[in-house]
Image: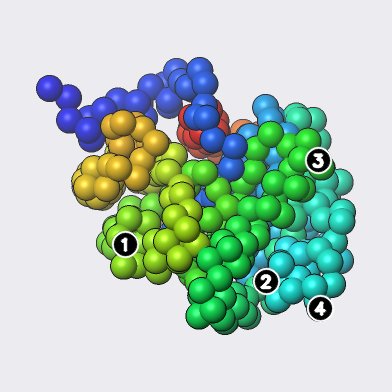
Amino acid sequence: MTTSLEKVLERHAQILESAFVQPAGQKFRSYAISNLRGGVGKSSIAFNLAYEISREHALLVTDVCPQRNMTELLLGDFKPKATLYNALQPIILGPAFGEPPEDLAYRVSQYCDDFKGGKGCWVIAGNSELFAFPSMLYQQLNVAHGQNKQEAVRNLLGGLKKLLDKEANDKKCEKILIDTSPFYAGGTHLAWCAVEALIIPVRVDEHSMESMELMMRQLSEQQRDFRLWNDRAGSLPTPKIAAVVMTMVGSKSQKKATPDQASRMYIERAIGIAEEFAHLFAHPDPSDAFVLTDDFHSAGRISGAKRIPIAELKVRAFHTVENKRLQVNASVTRYQRQLKYLASMI
């Protein structure tokens, strides 16, 4: 009988060797890319996934992380006047802070040339002021809960969802993608309330195993903050897990489609954690949600520094990054296939 690990590795080999993709994605409209740890490649996955999804579906992206990595990848040095923070302030603090901006999203192709074509991609820009957002949100939530105002709690937690749904409808977007902060409080909490499904990047290391398990517990245990506030709002739904993206997976030099032993150990452990919390997954078999991605090496550095989606990098092309001349090597084809598969299965 094939083990879950063998199943994941066989599919990985199929993706690399024959560019396998899923014939149809999942039923969800809205996704958040989330992990309660930094340094797992989250914004890189988000940027490239935004590009891939927008080839097939009109896409609205937003960035609830105060570091604004996703915003900078999509908009470069442009300083947007309208941001997510401007829109959330009146929702959380009330009409004294004005009305949310009417025209909130920016068309990405105007600021990142490689996004031209496809079905279109729009972004609601992040803002570094979101660092202060958690205290603002929980102060209002505690006031509403203290006054037994369940509807007020529901409106606060559902504020981001309402905002995104309106903007997506205005821009005729079929899909919504949120890049979140590695910290749960504030924006990430609202993002989980705003979406139907989660994409979880998990790096092949010990700390990522711990953060993956912590995230599963936050989503499933009644006494944890997320479920506690969902109940106080009148049983808000918990998003399903649509994908677990193992990042920075090493490869055996002798077998190009086979992860190295250390990576396989962490992949197997991550599958074990997923199976323990199988009820959170959209797939009946949680191992079907797993996607393996390599350490993108120089291609990843070029993509991030030059704001070029990995799908648009050309083998043997040279780029200068931080005064170093880097060449795109043939392994970029592997990365392109992995990212295309990820987009196809969500």
Foreground mark, 4 or 3? 4
Q: Report if residue 254 is visible in the image.
A: no
Instruction: Answer whether labels 4 and 3 touch (C-beta < 8 Å).
Output: no
Q: Amino acid at mark 2?
A: Ile
Location of residue 100 by image quarter: bottom right
Label drawn at residue 96: 4
Tell which circle, 4 or 1, labels the residue nearer the N-terminal end.
4
Crowdedness of circle 3 by 10 Å Cα count: few (<14), some, many (20+)? Answer: some
Q: Position of residue 129 (x, y in %)?
A: 69, 76
Do tag 1 and tag 2 residues touch (Cβ < 8 Å)? no
The residue that disc 3 covers is 171
Quote the CA–CA distance across marks 1 and 3.
Answer: 37 Å
Q: Assess whether mark 3 and mark 1 are in contact (beta carbons under 8 angstroms).
A: no
Whole-angstrom CA distance, mark 4 to mark 3, is 27 Å
**For this rendering, which residue is in front, 200 or 322?**
200
Residue type indicated by callout 3: Lys
